[in-house]
Image: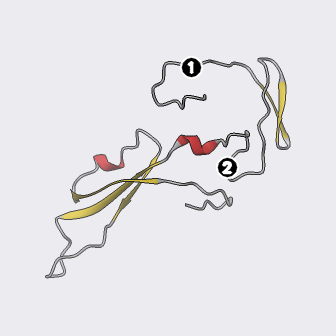
C-alpha cells in the first residue's frame, strides 16, 4: 500500500473467507492490519448476496525500522541516545524521556 506521503506499507495475506452481510465485528481492529470486504456482490437474480468475501492481512511491525535505524519509507535515520539526551529526527529535535528493556516477549527476534 503506497500512502499519499510516498511511504510504502507492506501487508502479509492472513485469511480469505465468506462472512454474513450483517457481520460487523470484522471491522473491529485490535492489531495492525488490513481488512478488504467485497460489498457489491449480487446473486443470479441481481439481489445482494447473503455473504461477502473478506480478505485480511497483517502488518508486520518489524518493517517500521530497518537494521541500520533507517525508518522505512522516509529519509530519516534514528540516533541512539540516553534518557534526557536530545536527539535529532530529521529537522526536529526530540528529548528521550524513558527507555525500557523488554526481554519476555516471545515474538521478539533473537537479536533484539
Say which residue appears at 25% left-offset and 64% top-offset: 52
The local secondary structure at tag 2 comes to: loop
Q: Is residue 45 toward the left or the right of residue 110 in the image? A: left
User: Residue pushed farthest bottom?
Assistant: 45
Q: Which mark is residue 71?
A: none
Say which residue appears at 82% left-offset and 43% top-offset: 90
- Residue 74 image position (x, y, % from top left): 73, 51
Question: Is 97 located above or below residue 73 in the figure?
Answer: above
How many residues crowd mark 2 within 10 Å: few (<14), some (14–19), many (20+)? some
Camera-nearest residue between 64 and 84: 64
Q: Quadrant of residue 87?
A: top right
- Residue 9 image position (x, y, % from top left): 57, 54
Say which residue appears at 30% left-offset and 72% top-offset: 40
Question: Is 40 located above or below residue 28 in the figure?
Answer: below
The image shows a total of numbered marks equal to: 2
Question: Mark 1 or mark 2: which comes first in sequence?
Answer: 2
Q: Which mark is residue 72?
A: 2
- Residue 5 image position (x, y, % from top left): 68, 58
Say which residue appears at 31% left-offset and 67% top-offset: 39
Structural distance between the alpha carbons of marks 1 and 2: 23 Å
- Residue 13 image position (x, y, % from top left): 40, 55
Question: Is 67 located above or below residue 103 in the figure?
Answer: below
The local secondary structure at tag 1 comes to: loop
User: Residue pushed farthest front?
Assistant: 110
Q: Is residue 101 toward the left or the right of residue 54 in the image? A: right
Q: Is residue 19 toward the left or the right of residue 107 in the image? A: left
Quadrant that contains the C terminus: top right
Camera-nearest residue between 15 and 111: 111
Which residue carries the number 1 mark?
102
How many residues crowd mark 1 within 10 Å: few (<14), some (14–19), many (20+)? few
Amino acid at each position: 500500500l503506497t500512502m499519499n506521503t510516498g511511504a510504502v506499507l507492506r501487508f502479509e495475506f492472513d485469511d480469505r473467507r465468506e462472512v454474513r452481510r450483517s457481520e460487523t465485528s470484522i471491522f473491529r481492529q485490535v492489531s495492525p492490519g488490513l481488512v478488504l470486504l467485497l460489498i457489491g456482490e449480487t446473486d443470479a437474480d441481481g439481489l445482494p448476496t447473503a455473504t461477502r468475501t473478506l480478505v485480511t492481512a497483517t502488518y508486520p511491525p518489524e518493517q517500521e525500522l530497518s537494521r541500520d535505524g533507517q525508518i522505512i519509507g522516509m529519509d530519516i535515520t534514528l540516533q541512539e541516545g540516553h534518557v534526557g539526551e536530545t536527539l535529532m529526527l530529521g529537522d526536529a529535535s526530540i528529548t528521550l524521556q524513558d527507555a525500557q528493556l523488554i526481554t519476555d516477549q516471545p515474538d521478539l527476534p533473537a537479536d533484539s
